[in-house]
Amino acid sequence: MRNAEAIKRRLEAAKHIGDQKEALNTLADITFDIGISACEERAKLQNEIDNLRRIISGNGDIEHSLISRVSEMERCVSTMGEDITKIKNALLGDIGDDDKYTGGIMGKINDLKDFKSGVTKIMWAIILAAISQIVVAILGLI
């Protein structure tokens, strides 16, 4: 019996039965119904537990088990973490022992910007020198 209220009503009704033998039979019937319901529920629970075990264990195939999948995910996350650390180090500094420059890619970009600025200044100096030579040559012709 799945309904607790129905059980309660039947037990209350059994209390009011005048004949003890009939009341005892009614209580036995209620107890039997409760036992049958409990067995059915246990069978359903056992099926659910078996299904969960198959899902968790991969139905006998260890490679398809949840435990194996979680282990594989853990390994992948660990690898990704190492790769992210390498990328961070490359961007911000500490590239490695094989490279003597430890300022990182961002440091190299800043150095290139400074170099470009210096090259631009030298280029303007050369252009101004060339213009001044042209002006001197023109003034010399006059």
Image: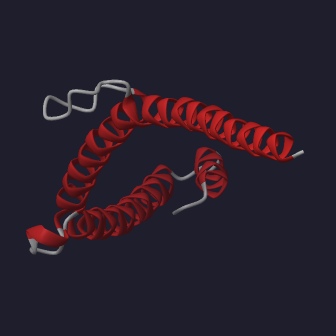
State the residue at coordinates (76%, 37%). Answer: 132
State the residue at coordinates (45%, 28%). Answer: 107
Colouring scheme applied when the structure was drawn: secondary structure
Instruction: Please tell me whether residue 3 is drawn above or below residue 87 in the rendered image.
Output: below
Residue nearest the observer in this picture, 49 or 133 = 133
Instruction: Please tell me whether residue 131 is drawn above or below residue 13 in the rendered image.
Output: above
Q: Residue furthest right?
A: 142
Figure quadrant of the C terminus: top right
Give the quarter of the image for residue 100: top left
Apparent side of residue 36 relative to residue 1 in the rendered image (left or right): left
State the residue at coordinates (65%, 52%). Answer: 13
Instruction: Please tell me whether residue 89 is drawn above or below residue 137 in the rendered image.
Output: above
Residue 39 in the image, given as x and y percentages of width and height: 32, 64
Instruction: Please tell me whether residue 134 is drawn above or below residue 64 in the rendered image.
Output: above
Residue 17 in the image, given as x and y percentages of width and height: 61, 51
Residue nearest the observer in this picture, 27 or 92 = 92
State the residue at coordinates (19%, 52%). Answer: 71
Residue nearest the observer in this picture, 88 or 127 = 127
Residue nearest the observer in this picture, 84 or 50 = 84
Count of numbered circles on the image? 0
Residue 80 in the image, given as x and y percentages of width and height: 31, 48
